[in-house]
Amino acid sequence: MANRRSPDDLQAAVDAGVIDAAQAEKLRAMRGGSTPVIGPDGEPALADEERFRFLNGFNDVFLTIGVLLVAGAVLAATSTTFFGLGWAATMAVGAAMFWALSEILVGRLRAVLPGMVLSILFVLFAAAAVVIQLHWDNLKTSNWDVASELAFWRNPTLVFGIPALVAALVYYLRFRLPFALALIACFGYAVAARSLYDIGVGFSITAIGYGLLVLAVALAYDARDPQRVTRLSDCAFWLHLVAAPLIVSPALMLIKHATNSGATSAIILLTVLLLAIFALAIDRRALLVSSLASFTVAVYDILSGGVGLPDRGGIPISFILTLALVGGFVLLLGVFWHPLRQRLLPFLQSMPFARNLPPARQ
Protein backbone atom coordinates (compact mmCIF):
# COMPACT_ATOMS: atom_id res chain seq x y z
CA MET A 1 0.00 0.00 0.00
CA ALA A 2 1.39 3.37 -1.02
CA ASN A 3 2.42 5.74 1.69
CA ARG A 4 -0.25 8.44 1.72
CA ARG A 5 1.92 10.73 3.80
CA SER A 6 4.77 11.09 1.31
CA PRO A 7 6.19 14.62 1.68
CA ASP A 8 7.02 17.05 -1.09
CA ASP A 9 10.14 15.56 -2.65
CA LEU A 10 11.38 18.95 -3.77
CA GLN A 11 10.94 20.40 -0.30
CA ALA A 12 12.76 17.40 1.15
CA ALA A 13 15.61 18.04 -1.27
CA VAL A 14 15.75 21.70 -0.15
CA ASP A 15 15.74 20.71 3.52
CA ALA A 16 18.57 18.25 2.87
CA GLY A 17 20.63 20.88 1.08
CA VAL A 18 20.62 18.97 -2.22
CA ILE A 19 19.10 21.92 -4.09
CA ASP A 20 18.29 25.46 -3.05
CA ALA A 21 14.85 27.07 -2.85
CA ALA A 22 15.21 28.90 -6.16
CA GLN A 23 15.97 25.67 -8.02
CA ALA A 24 12.99 23.99 -6.33
CA GLU A 25 10.70 26.81 -7.49
CA LYS A 26 11.85 26.35 -11.09
CA LEU A 27 11.29 22.59 -10.92
CA ARG A 28 7.80 23.11 -9.49
CA ALA A 29 7.00 25.48 -12.33
CA MET A 30 8.25 22.93 -14.87
CA ARG A 31 6.04 20.17 -13.53
CA GLY A 32 3.00 22.46 -13.47
CA GLY A 33 2.30 23.18 -9.86
CA SER A 34 3.17 22.37 -6.30
CA THR A 35 2.66 19.19 -4.34
CA PRO A 36 -0.31 19.37 -1.98
CA VAL A 37 0.34 19.69 1.72
CA ILE A 38 -0.31 16.40 3.54
CA GLY A 39 -2.12 16.63 6.86
CA PRO A 40 -1.48 14.51 9.99
CA ASP A 41 -4.26 12.11 8.96
CA GLY A 42 -2.58 11.38 5.64
CA GLU A 43 -5.15 13.38 3.65
CA PRO A 44 -4.37 16.53 1.68
CA ALA A 45 -4.56 19.49 4.05
CA LEU A 46 -6.39 22.72 3.29
CA ALA A 47 -3.90 25.01 1.58
CA ASP A 48 -3.22 28.23 3.45
CA GLU A 49 -2.47 31.00 0.99
CA GLU A 50 -0.51 32.96 3.61
CA ARG A 51 2.00 30.25 4.43
CA PHE A 52 5.51 31.62 4.55
CA ARG A 53 8.83 29.95 5.17
CA PHE A 54 9.92 30.53 8.75
CA LEU A 55 11.60 27.24 9.59
CA ASN A 56 13.05 24.45 7.47
CA GLY A 57 13.06 22.30 10.57
CA PHE A 58 14.20 22.32 14.18
CA ASN A 59 17.76 22.57 12.95
CA ASP A 60 16.96 26.20 12.13
CA VAL A 61 16.18 26.79 15.81
CA PHE A 62 19.42 25.06 16.74
CA LEU A 63 21.39 27.22 14.33
CA THR A 64 19.64 30.36 15.57
CA ILE A 65 20.71 29.61 19.13
CA GLY A 66 24.27 29.36 17.88
CA VAL A 67 23.95 32.67 16.03
CA LEU A 68 22.61 34.39 19.15
CA LEU A 69 25.47 33.04 21.26
CA VAL A 70 28.01 34.31 18.72
CA ALA A 71 26.19 37.66 18.62
CA GLY A 72 26.43 37.81 22.42
CA ALA A 73 30.16 37.22 22.21
CA VAL A 74 30.53 39.96 19.60
CA LEU A 75 28.51 42.41 21.67
CA ALA A 76 30.60 41.62 24.75
CA ALA A 77 33.79 42.09 22.74
CA THR A 78 32.70 45.57 21.64
CA SER A 79 33.10 46.76 25.23
CA THR A 80 36.87 46.32 24.90
CA THR A 81 37.07 46.40 21.04
CA PHE A 82 38.64 43.63 18.97
CA PHE A 83 42.45 43.42 19.31
CA GLY A 84 42.67 47.11 20.21
CA LEU A 85 40.79 48.28 17.12
CA GLY A 86 38.70 51.44 17.19
CA TRP A 87 34.96 51.39 17.74
CA ALA A 88 34.11 51.75 14.06
CA ALA A 89 36.52 48.95 13.08
CA THR A 90 35.11 46.76 15.85
CA MET A 91 31.58 47.16 14.50
CA ALA A 92 32.84 46.54 10.98
CA VAL A 93 34.52 43.29 12.07
CA GLY A 94 31.26 42.22 13.72
CA ALA A 95 29.31 42.98 10.54
CA ALA A 96 31.87 40.98 8.52
CA MET A 97 31.46 38.01 10.88
CA PHE A 98 27.68 38.08 10.47
CA TRP A 99 28.08 38.32 6.70
CA ALA A 100 30.41 35.30 6.70
CA LEU A 101 27.88 33.32 8.75
CA SER A 102 25.18 34.38 6.30
CA GLU A 103 27.21 32.98 3.41
CA ILE A 104 27.13 29.58 5.11
CA LEU A 105 23.71 29.50 6.78
CA VAL A 106 21.69 31.52 4.26
CA GLY A 107 23.63 31.25 1.02
CA ARG A 108 24.45 27.55 1.29
CA LEU A 109 22.00 25.97 3.77
CA ARG A 110 19.07 28.30 2.98
CA ALA A 111 18.24 28.49 6.70
CA VAL A 112 15.40 30.99 7.16
CA LEU A 113 15.19 31.83 10.86
CA PRO A 114 18.98 32.17 11.33
CA GLY A 115 18.98 34.32 8.20
CA MET A 116 16.41 36.66 9.71
CA VAL A 117 18.52 37.10 12.84
CA LEU A 118 21.74 37.50 10.85
CA SER A 119 20.20 40.07 8.52
CA ILE A 120 19.18 42.23 11.49
CA LEU A 121 22.60 41.89 13.13
CA PHE A 122 24.47 42.66 9.92
CA VAL A 123 22.40 45.75 9.17
CA LEU A 124 22.71 47.14 12.71
CA PHE A 125 26.47 46.53 12.98
CA ALA A 126 27.23 47.81 9.48
CA ALA A 127 25.19 50.98 10.07
CA ALA A 128 26.77 51.50 13.49
CA ALA A 129 30.25 51.19 11.96
CA VAL A 130 29.46 53.92 9.44
CA VAL A 131 27.86 56.23 12.03
CA ILE A 132 30.74 55.88 14.48
CA GLN A 133 33.30 56.50 11.73
CA LEU A 134 31.46 59.61 10.57
CA HIS A 135 31.26 60.82 14.16
CA TRP A 136 35.00 60.46 14.71
CA ASP A 137 35.66 62.19 11.39
CA ASN A 138 33.51 65.07 12.62
CA LEU A 139 35.45 65.25 15.89
CA LYS A 140 38.77 65.39 14.03
CA THR A 141 37.83 68.43 11.95
CA SER A 142 39.61 71.65 12.85
CA ASN A 143 36.36 73.60 13.14
CA TRP A 144 34.72 71.20 15.55
CA ASP A 145 32.69 72.74 18.35
CA VAL A 146 29.56 71.96 20.31
CA ALA A 147 27.40 73.43 17.55
CA SER A 148 28.89 71.11 14.91
CA GLU A 149 28.42 68.14 17.24
CA LEU A 150 24.77 69.02 17.77
CA ALA A 151 24.33 69.53 14.04
CA PHE A 152 25.73 66.07 13.37
CA TRP A 153 23.23 64.43 15.71
CA ARG A 154 20.33 66.71 14.75
CA ASN A 155 18.95 64.07 12.42
CA PRO A 156 19.84 60.69 14.02
CA THR A 157 17.21 59.00 11.85
CA LEU A 158 19.04 60.03 8.70
CA VAL A 159 22.50 59.48 10.18
CA PHE A 160 21.68 55.87 11.05
CA GLY A 161 18.79 55.21 8.64
CA ILE A 162 20.64 55.78 5.37
CA PRO A 163 23.55 53.34 6.02
CA ALA A 164 21.08 50.84 7.49
CA LEU A 165 18.93 51.11 4.37
CA VAL A 166 21.94 50.55 2.12
CA ALA A 167 23.11 47.59 4.23
CA ALA A 168 19.66 45.98 4.10
CA LEU A 169 19.52 46.46 0.33
CA VAL A 170 22.95 44.90 -0.15
CA TYR A 171 21.97 41.95 2.05
CA TYR A 172 18.81 41.31 0.05
CA LEU A 173 20.58 41.56 -3.31
CA ARG A 174 23.14 39.00 -2.19
CA PHE A 175 20.97 36.44 -0.37
CA ARG A 176 17.43 37.17 -1.68
CA LEU A 177 16.06 36.63 1.82
CA PRO A 178 12.40 37.77 1.80
CA PHE A 179 12.64 39.08 5.37
CA ALA A 180 15.34 41.55 4.26
CA LEU A 181 12.66 43.33 2.22
CA ALA A 182 10.92 44.18 5.48
CA LEU A 183 14.14 45.75 6.76
CA ILE A 184 14.47 47.75 3.54
CA ALA A 185 10.88 48.95 3.84
CA CYS A 186 11.26 49.91 7.51
CA PHE A 187 14.49 51.85 7.17
CA GLY A 188 13.24 53.36 3.92
CA TYR A 189 10.24 54.74 5.79
CA ALA A 190 12.47 56.14 8.55
CA VAL A 191 14.55 58.02 5.98
CA ALA A 192 11.53 59.20 3.97
CA ALA A 193 9.57 60.34 7.03
CA ARG A 194 12.49 62.36 8.41
CA SER A 195 13.32 63.90 5.04
CA LEU A 196 9.72 64.85 4.23
CA TYR A 197 9.12 66.21 7.73
CA ASP A 198 11.96 68.67 7.21
CA ILE A 199 10.08 70.16 4.24
CA GLY A 200 6.77 70.34 6.07
CA VAL A 201 5.04 67.03 5.25
CA GLY A 202 3.33 65.52 8.29
CA PHE A 203 4.14 62.04 9.54
CA SER A 204 0.58 60.76 8.99
CA ILE A 205 0.52 61.78 5.32
CA THR A 206 4.02 60.38 4.82
CA ALA A 207 3.10 57.09 6.49
CA ILE A 208 -0.03 56.62 4.39
CA GLY A 209 1.73 57.53 1.13
CA TYR A 210 4.75 55.37 1.86
CA GLY A 211 2.52 52.53 3.07
CA LEU A 212 0.54 52.62 -0.16
CA LEU A 213 3.81 52.46 -2.11
CA VAL A 214 4.96 49.40 -0.13
CA LEU A 215 1.52 47.87 -0.58
CA ALA A 216 1.76 48.37 -4.35
CA VAL A 217 5.11 46.56 -4.39
CA ALA A 218 3.64 43.74 -2.28
CA LEU A 219 0.69 43.41 -4.66
CA ALA A 220 3.12 43.30 -7.58
CA TYR A 221 4.90 40.34 -5.94
CA ASP A 222 1.52 38.67 -5.32
CA ALA A 223 0.48 39.21 -8.94
CA ARG A 224 3.57 37.31 -10.10
CA ASP A 225 2.66 34.37 -7.87
CA PRO A 226 -1.15 34.15 -7.53
CA GLN A 227 -0.92 30.51 -6.41
CA ARG A 228 1.36 31.51 -3.50
CA VAL A 229 3.85 28.69 -4.01
CA THR A 230 7.18 30.47 -4.58
CA ARG A 231 9.54 32.77 -2.71
CA LEU A 232 7.70 35.75 -4.20
CA SER A 233 4.79 35.04 -1.87
CA ASP A 234 7.12 35.27 1.13
CA CYS A 235 8.44 38.59 -0.18
CA ALA A 236 4.88 39.91 -0.48
CA PHE A 237 4.00 38.68 3.01
CA TRP A 238 6.71 40.72 4.72
CA LEU A 239 5.90 43.81 2.67
CA HIS A 240 2.20 43.51 3.52
CA LEU A 241 3.20 43.23 7.17
CA VAL A 242 5.12 46.54 6.96
CA ALA A 243 2.58 48.37 4.79
CA ALA A 244 -0.50 47.54 6.88
CA PRO A 245 0.27 49.56 10.05
CA LEU A 246 1.65 52.45 7.99
CA ILE A 247 -1.66 52.74 6.16
CA VAL A 248 -4.27 51.73 8.71
CA SER A 249 -3.16 53.43 11.93
CA PRO A 250 -2.56 56.94 10.46
CA ALA A 251 -5.74 56.70 8.36
CA LEU A 252 -7.85 55.89 11.41
CA MET A 253 -6.17 58.68 13.36
CA LEU A 254 -7.02 61.16 10.60
CA ILE A 255 -10.63 59.95 10.70
CA LYS A 256 -10.78 60.59 14.43
CA HIS A 257 -9.46 64.14 14.01
CA ALA A 258 -11.66 64.95 11.02
CA THR A 259 -15.01 63.76 12.39
CA ASN A 260 -17.05 64.57 15.47
CA SER A 261 -17.14 62.10 18.33
CA GLY A 262 -20.60 60.81 17.44
CA ALA A 263 -19.71 59.77 13.90
CA THR A 264 -16.13 58.66 14.48
CA SER A 265 -16.91 55.15 15.71
CA ALA A 266 -19.39 54.51 12.89
CA ILE A 267 -16.92 55.68 10.24
CA ILE A 268 -14.18 53.52 11.74
CA LEU A 269 -16.47 50.49 11.64
CA LEU A 270 -17.27 51.21 8.00
CA THR A 271 -13.55 51.61 7.24
CA VAL A 272 -12.75 48.26 8.87
CA LEU A 273 -15.54 46.64 6.85
CA LEU A 274 -14.03 48.03 3.62
CA LEU A 275 -10.59 46.83 4.72
CA ALA A 276 -12.05 43.37 5.34
CA ILE A 277 -13.45 43.29 1.80
CA PHE A 278 -10.11 44.42 0.37
CA ALA A 279 -8.23 41.87 2.49
CA LEU A 280 -10.54 39.11 1.26
CA ALA A 281 -10.01 40.19 -2.33
CA ILE A 282 -6.20 40.13 -2.17
CA ASP A 283 -6.17 37.14 0.20
CA ARG A 284 -4.07 38.85 2.87
CA ARG A 285 -5.00 39.35 6.52
CA ALA A 286 -2.35 41.88 7.53
CA LEU A 287 -4.56 44.95 6.97
CA LEU A 288 -7.22 43.52 9.26
CA VAL A 289 -4.74 42.68 12.00
CA SER A 290 -3.43 46.25 11.94
CA SER A 291 -6.94 47.69 12.31
CA LEU A 292 -8.09 45.44 15.16
CA ALA A 293 -7.02 47.86 17.92
CA SER A 294 -8.98 50.79 16.47
CA PHE A 295 -11.86 48.46 15.60
CA THR A 296 -12.00 47.28 19.23
CA VAL A 297 -12.00 50.86 20.55
CA ALA A 298 -14.77 51.84 18.13
CA VAL A 299 -16.97 48.92 19.20
CA TYR A 300 -16.37 49.74 22.86
CA ASP A 301 -17.27 53.42 22.30
CA ILE A 302 -20.54 52.42 20.65
CA LEU A 303 -21.47 49.91 23.35
CA SER A 304 -20.46 52.09 26.30
CA GLY A 305 -21.70 55.43 24.95
CA GLY A 306 -24.36 54.95 22.31
CA VAL A 307 -25.99 51.78 23.61
CA GLY A 308 -25.59 52.63 27.26
CA LEU A 309 -25.32 49.14 28.76
CA PRO A 310 -25.82 48.91 32.52
CA ASP A 311 -22.74 48.71 34.72
CA ARG A 312 -23.09 46.35 37.69
CA GLY A 313 -19.66 47.08 39.10
CA GLY A 314 -16.37 45.37 38.41
CA ILE A 315 -15.49 44.93 34.75
CA PRO A 316 -18.03 46.86 32.57
CA ILE A 317 -20.44 44.73 30.56
CA SER A 318 -19.62 46.83 27.49
CA PHE A 319 -15.96 45.82 27.78
CA ILE A 320 -16.83 42.12 28.02
CA LEU A 321 -19.19 42.35 25.03
CA THR A 322 -16.57 44.24 23.04
CA LEU A 323 -14.00 41.48 23.49
CA ALA A 324 -16.62 38.85 22.65
CA LEU A 325 -17.85 40.64 19.52
CA VAL A 326 -14.39 41.46 18.16
CA GLY A 327 -13.14 37.96 18.96
CA GLY A 328 -16.18 36.45 17.28
CA PHE A 329 -15.62 38.66 14.23
CA VAL A 330 -12.03 37.47 13.93
CA LEU A 331 -12.98 33.82 14.40
CA LEU A 332 -15.78 34.02 11.84
CA LEU A 333 -13.47 35.56 9.26
CA GLY A 334 -10.79 32.97 10.01
CA VAL A 335 -13.16 30.00 9.74
CA PHE A 336 -15.17 31.23 6.75
CA TRP A 337 -12.37 33.04 4.93
CA HIS A 338 -12.39 30.78 1.90
CA PRO A 339 -16.21 30.56 1.53
CA LEU A 340 -16.42 34.35 1.79
CA ARG A 341 -13.79 34.72 -0.93
CA GLN A 342 -15.70 32.32 -3.16
CA ARG A 343 -18.74 34.59 -2.92
CA LEU A 344 -16.78 37.83 -3.28
CA LEU A 345 -14.59 37.05 -6.29
CA PRO A 346 -17.44 36.72 -8.83
CA PHE A 347 -18.36 40.36 -8.15
CA LEU A 348 -14.79 41.40 -9.02
CA GLN A 349 -14.41 39.51 -12.30
CA SER A 350 -15.19 42.61 -14.37
CA MET A 351 -12.37 44.57 -12.72
CA PRO A 352 -9.13 44.96 -14.69
CA PHE A 353 -7.08 43.59 -11.78
CA ALA A 354 -9.23 40.46 -11.37
CA ARG A 355 -6.79 38.22 -13.27
CA ASN A 356 -4.05 39.04 -10.73
CA LEU A 357 -6.13 38.02 -7.70
CA PRO A 358 -5.43 34.65 -6.07
CA PRO A 359 -8.03 32.08 -7.09
CA ALA A 360 -10.71 31.01 -4.62
CA ARG A 361 -9.87 27.87 -2.67
CA GLN A 362 -12.19 25.11 -1.61
Image: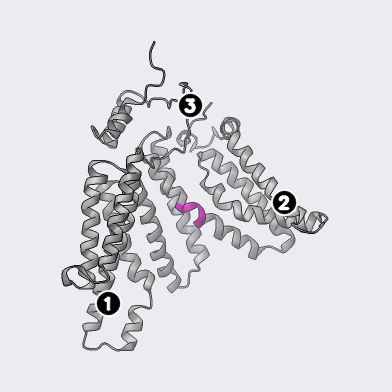
* Rendering coords of residue 44 (x, y %): 46, 23
Q: Which residue is mark 3?
A: 45
Q: Earlier in the sequence, mark 3 or mark 2?
A: 3
> SS for tag 3?
loop
Q: CA distance from mark 2 to mark 1?
A: 53 Å
Please tell me which residue lies in front, 153 or 95.
95
Residue at 54%, 32% (x, y): give it.
349
Please tell me which residue lies in front, 67 or 275.
67
Magenta residues span 242-246
For the residues carrying marks 2 and 1, which lies nearer the camera in this image?
Answer: 2
Q: Which residue is mark 2?
A: 320
Instruction: Decide: is 113 above or below 187.
Output: above
* Rendering coords of residue 90 (x, y %): 22, 67
Please tell me which residue lies in front, 312 or 119.
312
Residue 80 placement: quadrant: bottom left
Residue at 31%, 85% (x, y): give it.
148
Q: CA distance from mark 3 to mark 2?
A: 35 Å
> SS for tag 2?
helix
* Rendering coords of residue 93 (x, y %): 20, 63
Side of 348 where 268 appears, left or right: right
* Rendering coords of residue 300 (x, y %): 71, 55
Q: Which residue is mark 1?
A: 135
For the residues carrying marks 1 and 3, which lies nearer the camera in this image?
Answer: 3
Q: Earlier in the sequence, mark 1 or mark 3?
A: 3
> SS for tag 1?
helix
Mark 3 belongs to which amino acid? Ala
Crowd around label 1: few <14 · some 14–19 · many ≥20 (10 Å): some
Residue 140 placement: quadrant: bottom left
Mark 1 belongs to which amino acid? His
Mark 2 belongs to which amino acid? Ile
